[in-house]
Image (cartoon, rainbow, N blue to C red):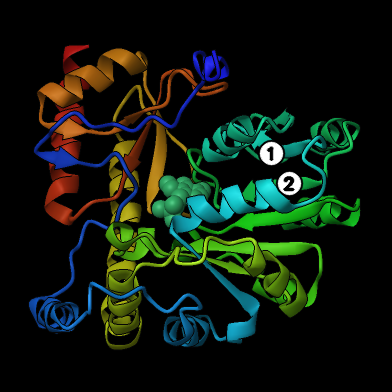
């Protein structure tokens, strides 16, 4: 009785079928080199596990601030950016005023709003998966107080028109730009706007650049906004291991991360170019560590790829995503396995 409203609840679904090649979660395909893992191992061994971690993550914040060339006062850290999304939906504006976001997009805006019982104002992207001013204006009529724009967007891969994001903020809506994939994009980011405005914040994550396992999200805002949001955060949300590992990787591992990002971007270009030569596949532009393709029968191709040992994410159930599959960029050998597999599948279709 008390939990009845959860019976029809749409929770976050992930792809868990075991497969030889996993290209389904937009992770960084590379682990860190042995010398860095050994440093991490030593540091983790020294953690006093009986003690609470630093509730303010002082040292980690300094390192993250330096990594993004901003000041620690502009930062709120989260247990993954999922937690920061939930925090914003919990505290920004009034809980009975809608959260707006385009569809299709990252599902956690919907999931968190539903958990909290907050109204949603969803609006469609245009045929090129770009923001559409008419649709934006319709959504604004519901008087939302919070907007989310994932740019580059998941699952479409493209970046949004920055003028339309600024337009939304200009209409008095607290605007969160979710830059989970920005490290793979050459478009201008929103860090300056976030640091200087009381209405625009940026959300980032370390998950896509090699640290999905430690759960570390970063919200960037002006100092006053950051300090207010920080009051509502769980006190020990950043675990001791996360603080220790994050500090090491974001200082000593910077070059490694930079090189991995370069490899991923160049592999993205290579794989997309090859796919464009396969008849029956449409490849959509991407600024991310994944890309979207359209095939003649999404469900069937997805199943057949699994039989070939390759797991990608089937997006066919989402609005505008009929027969679409989302493919993460892997290591060169994984990408080659995917290309071989999809060629086989397309021939058999
Ligand atoms: C757009 C977007 N935002 C946020 C996240 C969540 O990131 P985290 O692992 O930091 O919770 C994802 C993960 O896929 C994402 O695609």
**Could you tell whether 135 is left or right of 70 in the image?**
right
Q: Which mark is residue 147?
A: 2
- Badge 1: few (under 14), some or many (20 or more) residues near its Cα, within 10 Å? many
Q: Residue 204 carries which label?
A: none
To which residue does mark 1 refer?
A: 101
Residue 161, relative to residue 15: is it above or below? below
Q: Can residue 70 be seen in this view?
A: no
Which quarter of the figure has residue 48?
bottom left
Q: Is residue 40 visible?
A: yes
Q: Does the residue labelled 2 lie within 8 Å of ligand 1?
A: no
Q: Position of residue 321 (x, y in %)?
A: 50, 23
Which quarter of the figure has residue 316?
top left
CB-based contact (under 8 Å), mark 2 and mark 1:
yes
**Could you tell whether 307 is left or right of 319 in the image?**
left
Residue pictured at 49% horizontal, 87% vertical: 62
Q: Position of residue 250 (x, y in %)?
A: 35, 81
**316, 294: nearer the viewer:** 316
**30, 81: nearer the viewer:** 81
Dot 1: element: strand
Residue 40, relative to residue 168: is it above or below? below
Looking at the image, tell me whether mark 2 or mark 1 is earlier in sequence order.
Answer: 1
């Amino acid at each position: 009785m008390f939990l009845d409203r959860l019976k029809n609840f749409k929770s976050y679904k992930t792809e868990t079928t075991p497969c030889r090649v996993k290209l389904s979660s937009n992770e960084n395909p590379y682990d860190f080199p042995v010398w860095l893992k050994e440093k991490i191992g030593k540091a983790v061994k020294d953690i006093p596990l009986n003690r609470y971690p630093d509730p303010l993550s002082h040292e980690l914040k300094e390192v993250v601030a330096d990594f993004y060339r901003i000041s620690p006062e502009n930062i709120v850290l989260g247990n993954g950016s999922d937690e920061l999304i939930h925090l914003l939906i919990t505290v920004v504006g009034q809980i009975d005023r809608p959260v707006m976001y385009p569809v299709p997009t990252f599902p956690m805006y919907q999931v968190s709003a539903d958990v909290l019982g907050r109204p949603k104002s969803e609006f469609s992207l245009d045929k090129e998966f770009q923001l559409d001013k008419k649709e934006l204006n319709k959504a604004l009529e519901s008087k939302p107080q919070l907007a989310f724009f994932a740019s580059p967007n998941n699952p479409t891969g493209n970046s949004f028109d920055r003028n339309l994001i600024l337009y939304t903020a200009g209409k008095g809506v607290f605007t969160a730009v979710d830059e989970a994939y920005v490290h793979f994009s050459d478009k201008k980011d929103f860090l300056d706007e976030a640091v200087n405005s009381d209405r625009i914040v940026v959300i980032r994550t370390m998950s896509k650049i090699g640290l999905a396992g430690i759960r570390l999200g970063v919200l960037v805002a002006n100092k006053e906004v950051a300090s207010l949001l920080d009051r509502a955060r769980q006190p020990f949300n950043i675990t001791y291991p996360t603080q220790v590992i994050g500090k090491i990787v974001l200082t000593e591992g910077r070059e490694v991360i930079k090189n991995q990002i370069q490899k991923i971007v160049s592999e993205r270009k290579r794989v997309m170019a090859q796919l464009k030569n396969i008849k029956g596949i449409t490849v959509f532009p991407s600024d991310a560590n994944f890309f979207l393709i359209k095939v003649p029968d999404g469900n069937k191709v997805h199943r057949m790829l699994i039989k070939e040992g390759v797991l990608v994410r089937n997006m066919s159930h989402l609005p505008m995503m009929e027969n679409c599959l989302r493919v993460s960029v892997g290591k060169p050998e994984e990408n080659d396995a995917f290309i071989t597999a999809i060629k086989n599948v397309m021939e058999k279709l």
